[in-house]
Amino acid sequence: MLPLPLSRRRLLAAAAVACVAGTAQAQSGFPSRPLRIVVPFPPGGSTDLLARRLGEKLSPALGQPVIVENKPGAGGTTGADFVAKSAPDGHTLLMGVTGSNAIAASLFAKLPYDPLKDFAPVSVVVSAPLVLAVNASSPIRSTRDYLAAARAKPLTYGTPGNGTSMHLTGEMFDQAAGVKLTHVPYKGSAPALNDLLGGTLDSMFGDFLVLLPQIKAGKVTPLAVTSSRRHPLLPEVPTVAESGLPGLAGFEASSWQGLFAPAGTPREVVARLNAEVVKALEAADIREFFGSQGFIVGGSTPEQFKAFIEAEVPKWGRVVKAANVKID
């Protein structure tokens, strides 16, 4: 389960940490030059936008420019590897995601970094559930209907590609519910959505941001969200776990994004970064903007984030192994 957003009391505690870290800053000279947040994807996506908005908040707080640098490639692992091998001084950070810092450990035979050993987690930044959805013209109206239909004949589900969190969430659903869906990988979410709207694809495990406009337009029916709690923008849509079906109790799969420093970064530097990130995420404009995009905005302590990653890596590893997922 994702760490809960920090409470007001924890926020005050984080501010106290920032004061202590500020003293350490004077002693260590951090930050002594501009910081960069490496985004392991091309410009323009949600991770890039998130990093830029966060950087705008961090820059005045840290007294240095915060530059976003895009290093796309290999499903996010190129940028992650770059940060893992950067100097552990807090000036080079990674906006890591579920794929690069949890799924990749099992998906790639020769991953050049260890997501558990080569990073110092700073804070969860945002999370978002996936949505199990069908075309609005479909007679399927619930997870129970969906499973009944899947047992009658194989249903297809589309994703942005092999090994994505959407693909592996579908595989996790298969394994938990005891059905066999047919995965149809696309080169991105847009072509998958087009086929769902056109009726040539039965369903999608889709990104919230991609599906929400079509849900609001009445063209897509959301059956369930994959998080442990209902989403505030779709409060009437139950979670997968709420279906009450055997095997699906406790089902949870969310996409998340968080800030990482290289392993070995001094604790006082990580503490300073954490406190400033948590304060930035409390800003009304940040919460309003990303909340409207479907993200759950909230910070965590470094310890909470570390424990979360330590649970995420083996969780996705079990899914990958059981489904025998391979990346060519």
Image: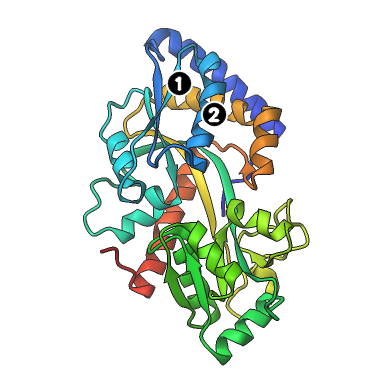
**Front residue of 199 and 325:** 199
Q: Which colour scheme appears in the figure?
A: rainbow
Residue 125's x, y, as percent? 55, 38
Tag 1, which secondary structure?
strand
Residue at 71 percent of width and 29 percent of height: 284
Residue 257's x, y, as percent? 50, 43
Amino acid type indicated by mark 2: Leu
Q: Is residue 100 visible?
A: yes
Position of residue 52 relative to residue 47, above or below, is above
**Front residue of 68 and 241:** 68
> Of marks 2 and 1, which one's residue comes earlier in the chain?
2
Position of residue 193 relative to residue 149, above or below, is above
Give the spatial CA distance, label 2 vs label 1: 9 Å
Residue 175's x, y, as percent? 48, 77
Residue at 66 percent of width and 25 percent of height: 12
Residue 127's x, y, as percent? 57, 47
Amino acid type indicated by mark 1: Val
Do tag 2 and tag 1 residues touch (Cβ < 8 Å)? Answer: yes
Quadrant placement of the N terminus: bottom right
Residue at 69 percent of width and 74 percent of height: 243
For label 2, the residue is 54
Quadrant placement of the C terminus: bottom left
Position of residue 194 relative to residue 248, above or below, is above
Q: Residues within 10 Å of mark 1 (few under 14, many from 20)?
A: many
Q: Residue furthest top?
A: 26
**Front residue of 168 and 249:** 168
For label 1, the residue is 66
In the figure, residue 315 lies in which quadrant? bottom left
Q: Is residue 6 visible?
A: no
In the figure, residue 217 lies in which quadrant? bottom right
